[in-house]
Amino acid sequence: MYNAVVSKIRELYSVDKGFIPLHVPIFMGNEKKYLNDAIDSTFVSSIGAYVNKFEDMMAKITGAKYAVAVVNGTAALHIALKLAGVKQNDEVFSQALTFVATANAISYEKAIPHFVDVDEDTLGMSPNALKKRLKEVAEIRKGVCYNRTTGNKIAACVPMHTFGFPAKIDEIIDVCNKYHIPVLEDAAESLGSYFRGKHTGTFGLMGIYSFNGNKTVTCGGGGAIVTDDKQLAKHAKHLTTTAKVPHKWEYAHDQIGYNYRMPNLNAAMACAQLELLEQFIENKRETAKQYEMFLRDVDTVQYIKEPPHCKANYWLNALRFSNEQEKENFLEYSNAQGVMTRPVWRLMNRLGMFKNCPTGDLPIANALGKTIVNIPSSVRL
Ligand SMILES: *Cc1c(COP(=O)(O)O)cnc(C)c1O
C-alpha cells in the first residue's frame, strides 16, 4: 500500500526517481519584472508603490475593507492580538493542533494560550469543544469574560484554518460573541479558502495571512492583517511603522512601535504571486481530486477532504492513518524513497514552553497528532 501511494505521488508530479519536496514555491509570472521595477525605483524598503498595490490586492481578494502589509505572519498575529487589547496574564483561546507561531504570538504579549480541541472533519478549532470549555471556566462580569478558576481575563480567541481547510468559523464566532470574546483568525494557511462563499480570515475582528516560502503564494517572507474596521487598520499601520507621527521632517513617535513593515521588494514579489493565486488554487484542487480518487480504494488510509459548504485551497494535502505505527511506517518508507512527507506538528501543549498552559479535553487533537501526515502538495507544472 505504501508503495502504491508513493508511486501515485511520483506519477502526479512526473518525477520517476528524483526527490519530491513537500511544497516548493513556483515563480512563473511577473516576479522578476516587478522586482526589477522596485529596484529601478530605488524604493526597496518599507515605502513604495508595491506595498500599496499589495494591500489593495489583498483587500480585493479577501473581500475585507482594509489590508495592512507586514513583515511576516507571526508579526501580523502579534499586532492583531495587541490591537484586540490582549495584555499580560490574559488568556487567549486557541487550538492545540496548530503551527507554533499561533501560540508564540500570544506569548509575545505575555498572555497565556488556552488550548482547546479541534474537529475531526475540519482539523480546525471545534466550536463544541470551545463552548464546553467556556462553560467549564468562563464567567462574564460587567461585559468582560474571565476565567473564574484563574481570575484571568479571556481576551481573545484565535482559531486556525488548518492546511487551508476552513474551520467552522460561523459557530466559533457565535460562541465567542456570547462570551464577548473577540475572534482573530489565523488564516496564515488559508489564502484562497472560503467558508460558505466568504473568504477565511474575514469573519472575525481581524484576520492574518502569511507569505512565507512554504505557503500557497510567497514573497520570501511577508504577512498581512485584514479587517473591516477603519480605526484598527489605521492603528495596525501605525504600530507596525514605529508609531511615527506623520510629519514632513520631524521624528516624533507617540508609543512604542514596531518595525514590522513589509519591504517594497517583498511586496513586488507578493503582487506577482497574488496574480497567480487563482491559477495555483485551481491546480492544487485538481491535484487534490487526483489524490482523493486514488485513495478512495485504499482503506487503511483516509484522505482528508474539504468540509461541506467550503472551498479549500488545499495548501497541504493530508492523510490520516489508522494508527500511529502505520503513520510511522509510511513516514519511514516514503522519505527513504525520496518522497517528502511529514507528520503534523507536535501538539502545542506538548511543547516544553507551553506544557503548563491551560487546556480543555483534547481527544481529537491527540488522535490526529498521532496519525496525520502531509504529502507533496506543490503546484504541478
Ligand atoms: C505559517 C504560519 C504562521 C506564521 O507565518 P510566518 O509568515 O512564517 O511568520 C502562523 N500561523 C500558522 C498557522 C502558519 O502556518
Image (cartoon, helix red, strand yellow):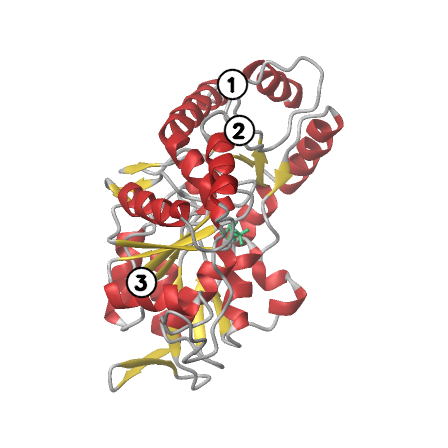
Mark 3 or mark 1: whose residue is earlier in sequence:
3
Q: Position of residue 145 (x, y in %)?
A: 32, 79
Residue corresponding to mark 3: 233
Q: Are marks 3 and 1 in contact (CB under 8 Å)?
A: no
Query: Which one is nearer the viewer's eye here, 130 or 279?
Result: 279
Q: Position of residue 76 (x, y in %)?
A: 45, 59
Q: Is residue 345 visible?
A: yes
Q: Position of residue 20 (x, y in %)?
A: 65, 25
Residue corresponding to mark 2: 26
Look at the numbered disc 1 and give the secondary structure of its residue: loop
Question: Which quadrant of the figure has residue 149?
Answer: bottom left
Q: Which mark is residue 318?
A: none
Query: Which one is nearer the viewer's eye here, 346 or 281?
Result: 281
Q: Quadrant of the N terminus?
A: top right
Look at the numbered disc 2 and give the secondary structure of its residue: loop
* Mark 2 and mark 1: Cα distance apart in space: 9 Å
Residue drawn at the location 39% of the way across and 60% of the way down:
129
Q: Are marks 3 and 2 in contact (CB under 8 Å)?
A: no
Q: Nearer the viewer, mark 3 or mark 1?
A: 3
Would the CB of label 1 be found within 8 Å of ligand 1? no
Residue corresponding to mark 1: 381
